[in-house]
Image (cartoon, rainbow, N blue to C red):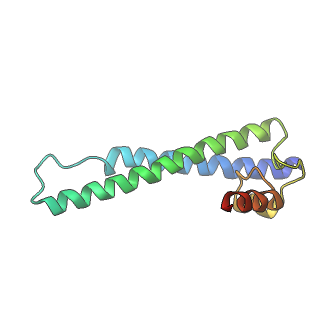
Amino acid sequence: MEQKSLEYFKEELLKQKQDILSDATKTMNENLVVAGEELPDSIDRSSIETDRNFTLRLRDRERKLLKKIDEALSKIGNKTFGICEECGEDIGVNRLKVRPVATLCIACKEEQEKKEKR
């Protein structure tokens, strides 16, 4: 892959990473804090607890994405970014633009999904 393309993907990945870290900080500072006063009823408590659990699940997914972003940045550093881990062929640039953390080309990803369905 050309150096210009690698720089583009590096910037995109770093931007995604910063957005995720910013959202996580916001969650820790705002969304998980419950007012010190007692909530009026169990429905309010249940609603807040449900929202909190949903937020935590989202942050867990983002934590996993952060790991993939770091791996992709490492691959950019060692010039293996954009190479399918299964077949060794190049991953299409359009696929990488949609999912820069992709590690498989379309053909290998489709094959993996077929195996998972069985």
**In the picture provided, is 18 more to the left or to the right than 7?**
left
The image quarter containing residue 85 is top right
Residue at 89% x, 50% y is 2
Q: Residue 84 in the image: x percent, y percent? A: 83, 49
The correct choice, above or below, for 76 with respect to 100 in the image is above
The image quarter containing residue 113 is bottom right
The correct choice, above or below, for 94 with respect to 8 in the image is below
**In the picture provided, is 30 more to the left or to the right than 73?**
left
Residue at 32% x, 58% y is 51
Tally of marks: 0
**In the picture provided, is 100 more to the left or to the right than 85?**
left
Q: Residue 74 in the image: x percent, y percent? A: 73, 37
Residue at 85% x, 51% y is 4
The image quarter containing residue 116 is bottom right
Residue at 75% x, 49% y is 103
Q: Residue 21 versus residue 84: which sits nearer the camera?
A: 84
Quadrant showing the C terminus:
bottom right
